[in-house]
Image (tube, grey):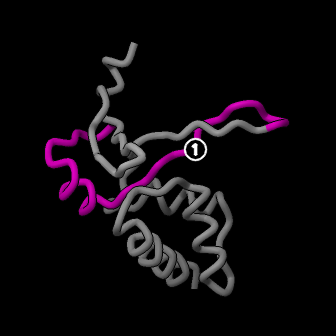
Amino acid sequence: MILMKTTRIREKIKKFLGDRPRNTAEILEHINSTMRHGTTSQQLGNVLSKDKDIVKVGYIKRSGILSGGYDICEWATRVWVSSNCPGWEEGTPIIIDQEGNVTTGSPPENQF
């Protein structure tokens, strides 16, 4: 039963990520508003990190009143990344500006 649920969640996530990367909070909101039983943030994190077709492409900064600032992961499908960033290397952030232009940032080891 659990396997079927994560399979449905995986398919729904891949469809949601089809047009552009999204952050974990957006994905969780989408799943929980479109699926009858939804998911937890912990289960979603497991699905996102273990699915070979979904990759982490960066972080966005959030500021919270109680917790201060924190990062939220941005996710994309490998298909979207290969079409929009042909030379992308895993671990390199993808930057999308407000006009929708896609560029890649420096690899993590060069960011200091």
The quarter of the displayed image where residue 92 is located: top left
Compared with residue 105, is residue 88 higher up or lower down, i.e. above or below?
below
User: Where does the N terminus fall, quadrant-wise?
Assistant: bottom right
* Residue 66 against residue 73 in the figure, above or below: above
Question: Residue lying furthest top in this view?
Answer: 112
The residue to which callout 1 is attached is 72
Q: Position of residue 112 (x, y in %)?
A: 40, 12
> Taking 88 as reference, is 9 left or right?
right
- Residue found 21% across the figure and 42% down from its top: 88
How packed is label 1: few (under 14 Cα within 10 Å), some, or many (20 or more)?
A: some
Q: Position of residue 26 (x, y in %)?
A: 57, 61
Quadrant for residue 84, please give it: bottom left
Q: Residue furthest right?
A: 66
Q: Is residue 94 above or below residue 36?
A: above
- Write the start and end of the magenta stretch as one range: 65-91
Kindly identify the residue that appears in the image at 19 percent across and 55 percent down: 82
Residue found 57% across the figure and 44% down from its top = 72
Pick the residue in front: 69 or 6: 69
